[in-house]
Amino acid sequence: MTKIGVIGAGSYGTAIVKTLLDKEGDVFWWIRKKDSLNKIKLFGRNPNYLRSVDLKLKEDQLSTDIKEIFKQSDILFIAVPSLFLRQVLRDISPAIMKNKLIVSTTKGLIPHDHQLISEYIIKKFKLHPEQFVFLTGPAHAEEIVRKRKTYLTLASSSEENALEAGSFLGMDFINIRTSTDVIGLEYAAVLKNIYAIAAGISQSVGYGDNFLAVLISNAIREMDLMLKEECAAERNLMSSGYLGDLLVTAFSKFSRNRTFGSMIGKGYSTKTALIEMNMIPEGHYAVKSLCKLLQDRCISLQIVSAVYHILYKQEDPLITLQALEERFD
């Protein structure tokens, strides 16, 4: 039986573990904190995320030794926020990664380097691009564990590897789609988190659904511009991996990026919002890296720029959004 490792014990890592267990897969789970691991052993539940989900794991399936998880796994699902990815993987050598398939659920950019996750992992571990698969939605972890109808897109330069990774997640309520547009889907995932922050801010400062609809229609045009500039390819932006994921992230009550934006719109400082959420809104960190990248590429994305100025230049959210109104179609 194929051995599957899951790196990360947040909500998405927990949802993947639950799905793999339901498929009766041979699962090994890396938990960073010993206290969390002990509670999962004792109670069969993650004490921090998706606490109502039963996780029937044997003791030898849980470990705080990340090297051991990597060594014994054939396929690795990495569900770690981009902010911590470099630190989490720092002791993993390229030799350990030989002939393994890496599936990333991380939707962000590596801070400081402004790299996509695929670029970072492939370079760091000297992988062939075919060994990397990017998993995207629209798919909130909260709905996956409730077995709500879900569409997953798995992108890789090897369709065979994308299908193999998808085979471990396919259930009667999960539809699997594949794509070769790895870079395009990664950038789309970065952007949708930023646009969800904009949606949350808009709602909190008093804009209604009419404005939000215009905001998102302009956002998809911005996404189209960005992808054409950075990674020209044949793609359908109206499909679930692009527009679908943008819509669910911008409007869902489960969206941490929308929630973060809503708190900012209500007057919370960035620091206070991050502390109270106790979760990572990837868009907050991604917008800083993305704006640096856009500046270097001479690309102008007005919604992305507005979110950056609200979060990092402390501009007034309402005044900043009002300035966008005149530019929207």
Image (cartoon, rainbow, N blue to C red):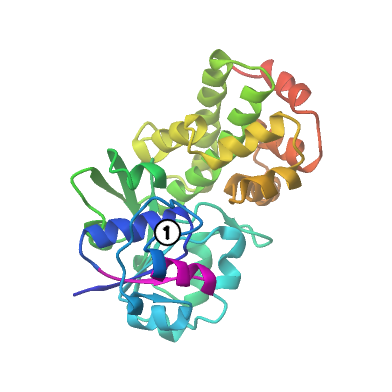
Q: Compared with residue 269, is residue 293 higher up or lower down, i.e. above or below?
A: below
Whether the magenta-drawn stretch holds residue 248 is answered as no
Q: Residue 180 at what x, y percent from top left?
A: 33, 52
Residue 59 in view here: yes
Q: Is residue 289 left or right of residue 164?
A: right
Q: What crowding class fits label 1: few (fewer than 14 Cα within 10 Å), some (14-19), or many (20 or more)? A: many
Magenta region: which residues? Answer: 26-41
Q: Is residue 121 left or right of residue 313?
A: left
Q: Quadrant of the C terminus?
A: top right
Q: Compared with residue 301, is residue 61 higher up or lower down, i.e. above or below?
A: below
Q: Residue 79 at what x, y percent from top left?
A: 46, 60
Q: Residue 313 at what x, y percent from top left?
A: 81, 40
- Nearer the observer, 179 or 56: 56
Q: Amino acid at mark 1?
A: Gly
Q: Quadrant of the N terminus?
A: bottom left
Residue 301 in view here: no
Please tell me which residue is depicted at 41% across the width and 53% down the height of the picture. Answer: 182
Q: Residue furthest front?
A: 42
Q: Which residue is mark 1?
A: 13
Tally of marks? 1
Please tell me which residue is depicted at 60% across the width and 30% down the height of the picture. Answer: 200
Q: Compared with residue 146, is residue 57 higher up or lower down, i.e. above or below?
A: below
- Nearer the observer, 79 or 30: 30
Please tell me which residue is depicted at 81% across the width and 37% down the height of the picture. Answer: 314
> Which quarter of the figure has residue 237?
top left
Whether the magenta-drawn stretch holds residue 37 is answered as yes
Q: Is residue 221 left or right of residue 167?
A: right
